[in-house]
Amino acid sequence: MTIKQKLAAYTKERKALLAVNFYNFETLKGLLLAAKAMNSPLILQLSESSLHYLGIDPAVAMARAMLKDFEVEGWLHLDHGSSVDIVKKCLEAGFDSVMIDASEQPFAENVRITKEAVKLAAGYGANVEAELGYIAKLEQDQKAEPTSAADAQRFSEETGIDALAIAIGNAHGFYKETPNLRIDRLREIRQVTRCTLVLHGSSGLPDIQLQEAIRSGISKINLATETKNTFMKKLQALLADSDEIDLRKVFPKAITEVQQLITKKLQAINI
């Protein structure tokens, strides 16, 4: 099943796919161990920074090989592509899905850039995600007005996107205050749009809010910050109390921490 078909089915069924960023072999292994144990599909995401670090072709080859090896149903997605150029490179490399993020541009420019990405992706049969509204990135002010239902309807219709990331009180990175998702606005947007709705910024969100968001129309949940934080904090703790230089003995414990995190997330969203 393609990612387009899976997300469309989940949108109709009011279910959600977990989409998790990976950064190296170890974090990827942790994600797939959890997905295999839970018999759950998974979207594997790569940001531009990770692509610069790993290389596009090696990252794709590793992801494809490990999905096959772990027998996990999964797809590869570009997270927050900043230009049509990077979208094109990822499509050529075999990505199943791409995100074009022109959300910081004026509405009309966001539409123009997104339409260009949608047209390009059509030739590959790939899924296209865009973002509308202010979803704070790291160190930005986390308080802002949510995406309006009217804008979401107009944007989705004019661009022809498959998935739309919206602002409903969510933020990238860890939350500075206890988050309070605007479920009322989410429901309004769900009523006037047909595309998959995406929740960015799930790191630190209470399970009850994630579950309510799914019941109200979110069908893709992104997780990034919490994954790398979990891996690094465990690694730092291990290295602080050890003189071990064999990474093959140190990394597995950090991989297990990632596996446990993703297992809990999958349990929380499979309502």
Image (tube, helix red, strand yellow):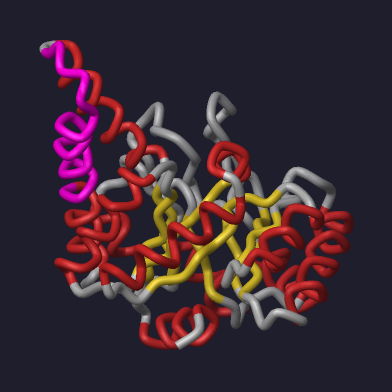
Residue 190 is covered by the magenta coloring: no
As drawn, which residue projects farthest toward the front?
246
Q: Quadrant of the N terminus?
A: bottom left
Q: Is residue 67 above or below residue 232?
A: below
Return the residue nearer the eye: 166 or 75.
Answer: 75
Return the residue nearer the eye: 146 or 171.
Answer: 171
Residue at the spot 38% in from the left edge and 69% down from the top edge: 17
Q: Is residue 105 above or below residue 61?
A: above
* Horizontal and vertical percent position of residue 241: 11, 12
Determine if residue 86 is in view.
yes
Residue 253 is covered by the magenta coloring: yes
* Horizontal and vertical percent position of residue 93: 65, 64
Return the residue nearer the eye: 177 or 232.
Answer: 232
> Residue 215 occupies which quadrant of the picture?
bottom left
Return the residue nearer the eye: 151 or 26.
Answer: 26
* Horizontal and vertical percent position of residue 60: 53, 60
Determine if residue 214 is in view.
no
Residue at the spot 40% in from the left edge and 82% down from the top edge: 10
Looking at the rendering, the stretch of residues picked out in magenta corresponds to 242-260
Main secondary-structure element of the magenta-colored stretch: helix
> Residue 231 occupies which quadrant of the picture?
top left
Residue at the spot 17% in from the left edge and 69% down from the top edge: 38
User: Image check: 171 left or right of 118?
Assistant: left
Residue at the spot 47% in from the left edge and 46% down from the top edge: 170
